[in-house]
Image (cartoon, grey):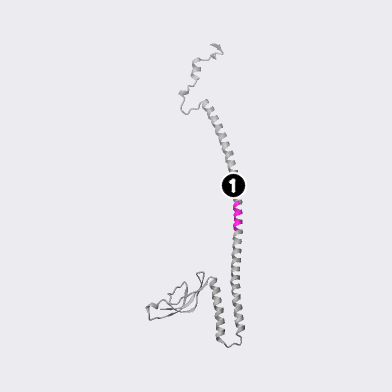
Amino acid sequence: MNKHNGNYKFKKDNRKDPNMENNNKVNPEELPEDAVVIDDVNATTEENEEAQETVAEGVDSLAEENEKLKAELEKSNKEYLFLMAEFDNFRKRTLREKSELIKNAAESAFKGLLPIVDDFERALKATEGSEDATAIREGMELIYKKLKKYLEQNGVKEMDPEDKVFDADKHEAISVVPVPDEEQKGKILDTVEKGYTINDKVLRHAKVVVGQ
């Protein structure tokens, strides 16, 4: 201890106390559960780096998958547009073929009627000034039979509604007549205009008189 200016000053001892040094050491077992140890920090850093690498790889993989999906979507869109164009062409072609089919069918039907028209013209010419009604009737009957045969060949058939029950799908009642017999009620009494079917489909309804 030195005396200076009336004050006492203690000389600092820089020697280390072995006990203090031991006291500064940290026992891991004495640390709290949430305490961070340097070794654990280093391990966590490595795990973070590995996780970042994994995330980076995942991002690259997603980007690659995204590009692949974009390419597939673009391909699908092109195929869709191609199919739409094909369908539109098919629709137009079908409508054109249908129109031509109807046109050709009509041409064929009328072409088949021309020989009958020729027969009528020849019959009219042959009977000019003739007073033989029997010969004229025979000629007309021949032409009529030829016409009916042509119609039947093309699926057109005459209905035979006489004495049959009235059917609104086939018949058109133009008159209703009271009848004394119960069995005649609802039945066709007379046909004013014949009905025809084509391929079993009604071409023209028969105009009939029905009993009531």
The residue positioned 58% from the left and 42% from the top of the image is 65
- Count of labels in the image: 1
Crowd class of label 1 (few under 14; some 14 to 19; many from 20; radius 10 Å)? few
Compare residues 131 and 173 and report the one nearer the observer: 131
Residue found at the far top of this picture:
2
Give the SS element for disc 1: helix
Percent across and percent down for residue 61 are 58, 39
Compare residues 137 and 66 and report the one nearer the observer: 137
Percent across and percent down for residue 127 are 60, 85
Up the image or down, 127 lies above or below 29; here it is below
Whether residue 9 is visible here, answered yes or no, is: no
Specify the quadrant of the image occupied by residue 168: bottom left
The residue positioned 61% from the left and 59% from the top of the image is 89
Q: Given the image, on which type of amino acid does mark 1 rest?
A: Glu
Percent across and percent down for residue 10 are 53, 14
Assess whether residue 85 is covered by the magenta stretch. yes
Assess whether residue 153 is covered by the magenta stretch. no
Position of 143 compared to 188: left or right?
Answer: right
Position of 31 compared to 121: left or right?
Answer: left
Compare residues 212 and 34 and report the one nearer the observer: 212
Task: Identify the magenta region.
Answer: 79-88
The residue positioned 48% from the left and 23% from the top of the image is 28
The C terminus lies in which quarter of the figure? bottom left
Specify the quadrant of the image occupied by residue 139: bottom right
Compare residues 186 and 61 and report the one nearer the observer: 186
Up the image or down, 132 lies above or below 205; here it is below
Whether residue 79 is visible here, answered yes or no, is: yes
The residue positioned 55% from the left and 11% from the top of the image is 3
Percent across and percent down for residue 116 are 59, 77
Q: Main secondary structure of the magenta part?
A: helix
Specify the quadrant of the image occupied by residue 188: bottom left
What residue is shown with label 1? 72
